[in-house]
Image: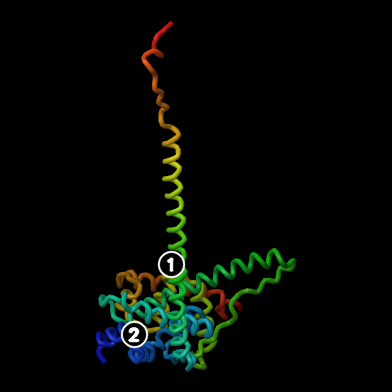
Amino acid sequence: MKESDLIQKLREADQEAFNIVFEKFKLHVFNTCISYLQHTEEAEEVTQDVFVEIYRSINHYKAEATLSTWIYRISVNKCLDFLRHRKRKKRSGLLINLFKRESSELQIDMPHFNHPGAILENKEKAALLFKVVDKLPDQQKTAFILSQIEDLPQKEIAAVMKLSEKAIESLLQRAKANLRKDLEIFNPGRRK
Amino acid sequence: MNNEQWKDDILDSMRGAKRAEPNPFLFTRILAQIETSEQSVPQSYFKVRLAVSACALILILNVTLIIRQVRVSAENSEPATYSLNDNQYQLY
């Protein structure tokens, strides 16, 4: 089915068309979410929200972007919103804990994340990668995830983020430089 | 392995990774959420209508009161008219 026909059917609330879109994009959306949130259940929750949003706002979709770009944009925005919400919750939790407990044991950091798709021999390295990616600023994080993990071409990343290709290149360079800097403290050679 | 090579390996560690699969019941959950939200739309419309009606009622009551108030004060502030005879203007 042509993309324009699919979109037309989606606008008519055709469930079969919605199923086709889900099957076509579920892995892209879920894997993008899992890279941002580093938590399988939360990634599923946000993936669910992304598809509900697609169903509801298909009438606002403009053909100036491809369906894939539009869906990636919704996914990135939902993930960033979720991360902000999580950060706020964490901050208020910290405050509550400060007032409630006398002890200084505050363990609210996310546990070590193992990506379910990482190759066995790379599991530890991938876990370390996600640990440092989590510290990147939002835009650098988005550029890095879409480029290095989702393997999108720079042109599509630029369309998703509504930036120029040059800006994406610069964001990627900065992201890699920051990741290298953060990785320094985990380097086994450095500990000797 | 040198330091830079080790960092490169970390940065490239997701290359060739498999895609993670979501829960097989995810689509059913999405359809259920859409259905639930569609059912709850009339309730939210009802709330909006109720709020608009309440505002309209308050506005009508206020306007009525203001009009009545203006009428009453207009009646009270009308200059008193006295009918005086010519005789009454005579000075003693």
Q: Foreground residue, B79 or A78?
A: B79
Residue under mark 1: which chain is it in?
B
CA–CA distance in space, label 2 to label 1: 26 Å
Q: Foreground residue, B55 or A140?
A: B55
Residue at x-position 39% and y-position 73%: A172
Mark 2 or 1: in front is: 1
Q: Quadrant of the N terminus of chain A?
A: bottom left
Secondary element under disc 2, as helix, strand or loop, is loop
Q: Where residue B66 appears, x then y in whole percent?
A: 44, 45
Label 2 CA crowd tier, 10 Å (few <14, some 14–19, many 20+): some
Q: Where residue A151 appears, x then y in whole percent?
A: 37, 84
Residue at x-position 41% and y-position 76%: A76
Q: Foreground residue, A84 or A147?
A: A84
The residue that label 2 is drawn on is A13
Label 1 CA crowd tier, 10 Å (few <14, some 14–19, many 20+): few
**Are discs 2 and 1 less than 8 Å apart at CB?**
no
Q: Where residue A10 appears, x then y in whole percent?
A: 32, 85
Residue under mark 2: which chain is it in?
A
| Disc assigned to residue B49 | 1
Q: Where residue A181 appears, x then y in whole percent?
A: 49, 72
Residue at x-position 39% and y-position 9%: B90
Residue A103 appears in the picture as rendered: yes
Q: Quadrant of residue A177?
A: bottom left
Q: Furthest residue to the top?
A: B92
- Is A65 positioned to the left or the right of B77 in the image? left
